[in-house]
Image (cartoon, rainbow, N blue to C red):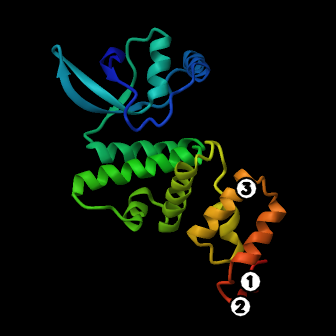
Amino acid sequence: IKIDHLEYPGPWQQRPLGVAFVRRLARDMRERGQIEPITVRPRARANGRALYQVVNGDGRARAGKLNGWDTLRAVVKQMDDWEAYVCYLLDNMAERKMPWEEVALGILAVEQALARKTGHPCNSRHLGRVLHRSKDWINDHKRAFRVVQAHGIPRGFVPHYKLLRPLGCGITFAIEETILQGIINEKWTLERVYEEVHERCKPRSSARGGCQ
């Protein structure tokens, strides 16, 4: 497909690609060629030419243009909005380690797009089936991101459900929110976090020995 006929970035692209990244990718493509095709979906014609929206491969499209190439290999798929969001998210989670907040944004975007398509809210169990993840995994990302949005915790912060969940305790939203605020505002150490968890949480089962 001609690069001039491509539309990018799509609304699912959660963060802009850096100039340095695109330049490195362009150099790699000059040396090795285009290894993987981009994924696109057809759009309406404009001025007598077919247009295609890039679903996965925004970086390769930019790098190809930077190299002065006329065309790129592409896979054309008919997709509605929510299918495009799912395709983008699944491909990028498989290809690279996405930042957790970008994954969370993608989950929320898929949820909204699917709700628009079906006309009713989409629950976490359904989202998990669509994204091949567990309901708990979906809820962890959604909840951590909403805490970040509500309290202005800087992006790049590692959500501490990854720390809290393995402790075998009944971590409620209120407890997690309190601990997150302690980590950010009061600079709690890891030892302080464990102390708070032991103090605030009841063991799920006495057979597990409580919070180890």
Residue type for callout 2 = Ser
x and y, in percent, of residue 202 in the image: 68, 83
Sort mark 2 into few (<14), some (14-19) or many (20+) by Cα contacts within 10 Å: few
x and y, in percent, of residue 95 in the image: 54, 42
Sort mark 1 into few (<14), some (14-19) or many (20+) by Cα contacts within 10 Å: some
Label 3's element? Answer: helix
Residue annotated with mark 2: 206
Along the horizontal axis of the image, is 44 left or right of 138?
left
Against 133, residue 102 (above or below) is above
The front one of 103 and 170 is 170
Label 2's element? Answer: helix
Q: Where does the N terminus fall, quadrant-wise?
A: top left
Residue annotated with mark 1: 210
Tag nearer the camera, 1 or 3: 3
Residue type for callout 3 = Ile
Of all residues, the one furthest to the top in this rendering is 68
Residue annotated with mark 3: 183
Q: Earlier in the sequence, mark 1 or mark 3?
A: 3
Q: Are marks 3 and 2 in contact (CB under 8 Å)?
A: no
